[in-house]
Image (cartoon, helix red, strand yellow):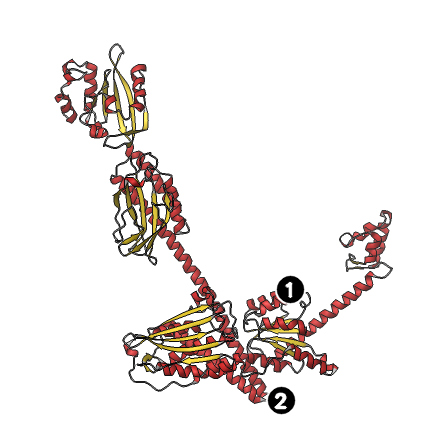
Amino acid sequence: MSSNRMAQLIRNKHWRNTPLGDMATWPPQLKTSVQIILDSRYPMFVWWGAHLINIYNDAYIPMLGNRHPTALGESASDIWADIWEVIDPQVQTVFQEGRATWNEELPLFMRRYGFLEETYFTFSYSPIRNEQEAILGLFCAVTEETSQVLKGRRLHTLRRISAVTEEADSVGEVCRLSAGVLTDNPFDIPFSLIYLWNDEQRALSLAAQSGLEADSRLTPLQITMDGDMCHPQPWWPLSLSDRCEETVFPVDVSLDVPGGAWPEPSRQGMVLPLESWETEKKSGYLIVGISSRLAIDDRYREFLNLLAKGISGGINRAQARTNERKRMEALAELNRAKTEFFSNVSHEFRTPLTLILGALDEAMNPKTTDSAAALAMAHRNTFRMLKLVNTLLDFSSLEAGRMKALFEPVDLSGLTNDLASSFESVMKKAGLDFVVTCPPLSKPVFVDRNAWEKIILNLLSNAFKFTMKGRVSVEVIQHAECVDVRVEDSGVGMSRETLLHVFERFFRARESLGRTFEGTGIGLALVKGLVQIHGGKIYVDSEPGRGSVFTVTLPFGFHHLPQEQVCHTPTEQADKSLVTTFILESGQWAGETSHELTRPKVLLEERESLPRTDQSRPIVLLVEDNRDMRDYLTRLLRAEYEVVSACDGQEALEQVHAIRPQLVLSDIMMPRIDGLELLTRLRANQELQSTPFIFLSARAGQEAEIDGLLTGADDYLVKPFSAKELLARVKKTLGLATMRRAAIEYESRFQHLAHHPEVMTWITDADGNCVFLSQTWYDFTGQTEATGMGEGWLSALHPHDRLSVQQAFHEAN
């Protein structure tokens, strides 16, 4: 007999106390079978006799688990009582029928280690016979396939996780798809929870789950962190450390957690961190149940860690795609905003350029009687262009980090009061209450004078621009460590959506209802940047229709500022040119430099008192939000036309029905209703749809012109333009409109004459095809336009006459 471990145990066992008796009495078939299995390194055993006494080799020991070595010499039915119901029929096949059996990866659930274990075996039972062919025992060669079956099953799960997360568009989709895959493997994953970490909320949010219902005692939708405390306290251990290690934990029996594929509830779980590629912090947690029928060994741990890495990878890939998509959207939005910004800047430059060039042309014309007014207009618009250029240069320097400030101790209350007071005249003339409350401060504030002027003037200019009635106020409030400057108005206010973007570069509110549509979209972005270089902050609070409050907070002292830019000796006060540009611009919005608008009622009354020749002058409705431009265009046109002006599309619509203009001359970019919307509404009106319409726009470029013409405009004139070009375009458009009206009237008269005489009338084209048949023809023949046109009219003739009539008809043509 062999000298291995089982051979030693077999030799030392007291066999005389077993049904086999003393080894010396064993039949030769048994001795030979035992010798074969002991000499083999393949797992084998022999069940002998009616009691199926078990004898096995060394290779079979691991398959017995805790049943070794007591299983030696015991009855197989006692050893494998937990699986006997499954294998006994096969044993009977061997002993009763003498046939061998075969099983491949047969699932068997046995208690080898104190718990009901999921196992898989490939084995064959073969009969052992004597010389008389009597069956004395059973021989079995067996392979445990548990690790292979589990490996294949788990590999399939990992492959599916990789596949479903590869192209998922969002983190949420990755989690939902992953949970779906885990649902399909309840053998290894009785349940799972995926929680994602939200840094801003300091909370874990449930992203997906399997095997459990969402929003239950076991699956709170959110776990909020308060220091080391959790609300609610999860039933699994939560580590907020950045160590990426899994944690196995026991499951409280009172929780009644599911067992997945098995009726026994899961009694262990594992918390696995989900790693982030972008930061060292965890992006969340995967909590899984451990199968009640499997031991948590190294292979199980490895599978679960690979599972967590697969889900983490999917989350990170989806997050990267989301970030890239957001980046591309942000770039597209930035590009759109830049395009709109350049369009706005073009508008802002072209309008004053038109007025400057036009004013200079007027002043140089010897026939001009009021050169001073023209030069004053040029002067105002030169200041406007100066303001635009300075704003663009300041913003460019700020964006590039090249702005050099000089911070000096300043009486901030006094400086703010002086700047605000310069707006008093403009505010009063616009009918607004203007309140300035700037009490003395106990100590100076370190600011750059020029930058502070731009901050206050921009905020006041904005408040004036968007406050049509009511009140504007400026207030300085001292606190212990800082000072607040509040600019408040009762104007149009802003929506929540606008508030989110109001300080962004190039942003302009869509719902602009101010005095003008003019603006570059960088004013408030510049203000925010200037406040930030002071180490301060700016806030805004607003509601639509309730006005806005801008609050600038600056800290006292100078240690928060770049020390090389701090000057402890106050410098001379800045010049007033910046204030002048803002006041002149606001004055234009308030109408300080222009006459009152000509209203339709006044115009009609004047027309009734004019001689007949004057009453025949065409009426031109001029729609322009810039008052200087309205005045300039009115002066150009009034020599030949009656001019009625409106400050935006809304006012134009209110006037157009009363005056019935022969031509509308309109800007595009205006508050309330812009030029494109005005044209769309006119073209949709049955009575006004044929009114000639010319766009005057600072939006240059073929695309802008095409947009205007496709909307239905008759012409598109880009600023700056000369007076001669404008007058020529107006004259041409009115002339074409007159010709169109004449053609329509001629067609109407022809139709009337053709349809009413007693004779039938028809008209052909150059090829002899009929293109017109009078109503008399239709009434007489019973044909319709669809059946009579072309050569269809011949079908109304008698068949015998058609050929001769057709020949005569073609000869006549």
User: In terms of secondary structure, where does tag 2 sit?
Assistant: loop
Image mark for residue 684: 1
Q: Identify which residue, 238 or 18, lies in the foreground.
A: 238
Where 644 sits versus 575, above or below? Answer: above
Classify mark 1: residues with Cα within 10 Å, few (<14), some (14-19) or many (20+): few
Distance CA(mark 2)–CA(mark 1): 43 Å
Q: Quadrant of the C terminus?
A: bottom right
Q: Identify which residue, 471 or 587, lies in the foreground.
A: 471
Q: Are marks 2 and 1 in contact (CB under 8 Å)?
A: no
Name which residue type carries label 1. Answer: Ala
Query: With 455 as the anchor, is 744 left or right in this view?
Result: right
Query: With 752 as the anchor, is 677 left or right in this view?
Result: left
Image mark for residue 367: 2
Where 810 sits versus 387, above or below? Answer: above
Query: With 538 as the anchor, is 790 left or right in this view?
Result: right
Where 69 sits versus 557, above or below? Answer: above
